[in-house]
Amino acid sequence: MERMKRMSKRSTFLLALLMFVFAAWPAGLIRAEESTTSTVQWDSQNPTTLNLGGSPAQLKVWSLTEKGKEDVTQKAEWISGDSSILKVDKGLITPVSKGQIKVVATYEKQTVSTTITVKSPYSKLQLNPSSPINLTIGGESKQLTAQGVLTGGGTENVSGVEWTSSNAAVATVEDGLVRPLAKGVTYIKASKDELKAQTIVYVRSSSQALVLSATGAKSVFLGSSPIQVSATDVNLTGGKTDVTNTAEWTSSNPLVATVEQGKITPMDAGNSTITASYHGLSKTLKINVLPTVEKLVSSKASLTLETGGKTSLPSISAYLVNGAKKAVQSDVKWSLSSESAVKIANGKLVAVNPGSATLTATVGALKLDIPVTVQYKVLKLTASEKKYVLVAGQEASIPTVKAHMAGGGILDVTNQVSWVGTTAAVTVANGKVKAVNGGNSGIKAMYMNKYVKVPVIVEGAISTLTPSFSSADMNLKGSKSIKVIGIYTEGKKATLSSKVKWTTSNASVAIVKGSSIKAVGIGNATITGTYQDKSFNVEIKVTPKLLKLVLSNKNLKLPKGSSQVLSVNAVYDSGATTDVTSSAVWTSSKPSIVQVTGGQVKAIDTGSSSIKVVYGGKTVATSARVLK
């Protein structure tokens, strides 16, 4: 009985367990006889290769069952082996980067996979232009374009390119635009996916030199005026431009000295380096700012020279406010009370004539006077000709030579001197100097251990000589530059303005200084230019310059219907005055109120008008009021 009870309990437990299993197990698995077997497969039209940068493509997957074929693309679970190469979403595949990746689709526990290759549509990347690029600092930028060479042939512009410069200090690049910054070489590189291209860029300065008006080192004193330094740019063809205001100026120590557009201002004792920079070039000037100077002292209290002699300028030192002694020779400005006895030339005192003068050394606001006395000595030789310009084979008479003797006497020693040519290009014989070969040379006259040199320039023969104009009208005190072009027999052209010998038929009307014609008086003159055996004339007419117009009456008041005659005089810079009433142009701002003809003013109607007179480029005006 007890055993039966135990078996009954066991049966009840097994039955309950079986019912639980059936309840929990998926119905489809229990009723296997009701399921349908399916097979998952790829669509035969699915792509296996995509171009990077191209459009996404759709993969399809089919479920094959006994009931037929079903597109389960949207139902399947999709996985990309590497989403950095290829992204997949419900079968839609999007290329991201070059590579080969496996795509897996799973449907109802069945899995299929395929390999997709992502490749570039281009065989290579190239730049346009591809040749080396030459840029200049401060010049225009250069636009580069990245092009892809298609695998099927041809090219197309590529977007989304990454641009880099190997040396951004020389040139930068942004979206292919290359901007030059500093002198040097850089490589501009473009990359797109795994493709790369590059070109070389040379950045040069548009200048060959930057020149400062002051160089080396300079001492200044506290409290002294600012120093103005100019900067000159010398371009690649030798042309010069003042860039003082456009150059970049810096001071290494602004506490000691500041600089702005070349103006250096001392601020405190110490040292600073002033730098000017322009188009990649730079120049420096060392500034030593010293404490205020209390007094100056000279190495010589006085100087005595003999005529014709020379001596170095004395050394000058400064006692500073802090008690220190400083040599300031390079900062001294020298001047003479008179140059009749002594002159300053190339850092030397040169005795000219017996007499005396005061030599003054100036440093900042302080001055120091040094007496100078000149006594007689043996004098020099002088030649009547400053230089010769000859054609090969041409002769000219030797110059007159005079000896300036002690005591003031002057002797003609032309026949006593011995002549030599300084080179084989010229010879001196029988009172003639003869040009033998082309080039620069000279002749030297020797007499009593003294000598004088005369330069000789041997040139080619001129075939024609042509001035820039053959006549000109000028105003008194005006000037006009003249350019002379010469053509040598071998065909070479040259500007000879400075070499032409100028004469004037009337020095009271026009003269020539250098290559500029000066109008000095009223009248006509003929300017003649001569070079070698060629000459030409330029006719000059000098007339007075009109300064102003003067009306006989201003601020007219006329009754209606009346008239009044005005006159106008032209005043010239020569002091002459001429009545130009009939020649001037008269106009009224309101002809309905006032009419004017040749100076005659007619009052037409009440009101006000302005009368303007024009003559020779000058204008004068007055007001006219018509009363009832």
Image (cartoon, grey):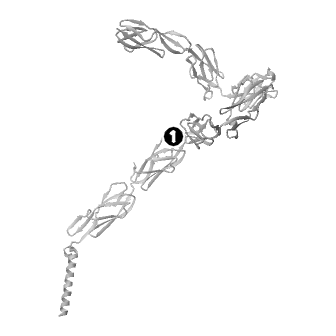
Q: Along the line of sight, which residue is nearer the eye, 612 or 450?
A: 612
At 22% across and 65% down in the image, what residue appears? 69
> In the image, what residue occupies the spot 53% across and 36% down?
246
State the image coordinates of residue 20 (x, y, percent, origin top left): 21, 79
Residue 210 drawn above or below residue 97: above
Q: Is residue 218 above or below residue 456?
A: below
**In terms of image quadrants, where is residue 211?**
top right
Res 342 visible:
no
Quadrant for the N terminus in the image = bottom left
Q: Residue at x 48, y 47 (%)?
A: 172
| Viewer-closest of 601 and 420 | 601
The percent position of residue 406, horizontal first and vertical second, equals: 81, 23
Q: Nearer the viewer, residue 40 or 578?
A: 578
- The picture places residue 516, in percent across and down from the top left corner, at 60, 22
Place of residue 382 in the rendered image (x, y in percent of width and height, measured from the top left): 75, 24
Q: Secondary structure at mark 1?
A: loop
Instruction: In the rendered view, tell whether residue 35 sits above or below residue 132.
Output: below
Picture quadrant where residue 123 is located: bottom left
- Quarter in which the C terminus is drawn: top left
Q: Which amino acid type is marked by label 1?
A: Gly
> In which quarter of the view is residue 6 placed?
bottom left
Residue 615 visible to the viewer: yes
Mark 1, residue position: 138
Q: How many residues crowd around disc 1 within 10 Å: few (fewer than 14), some, or many (20 or more)?
A: some
Residue positioned 47% across, 43% down in the render: 142
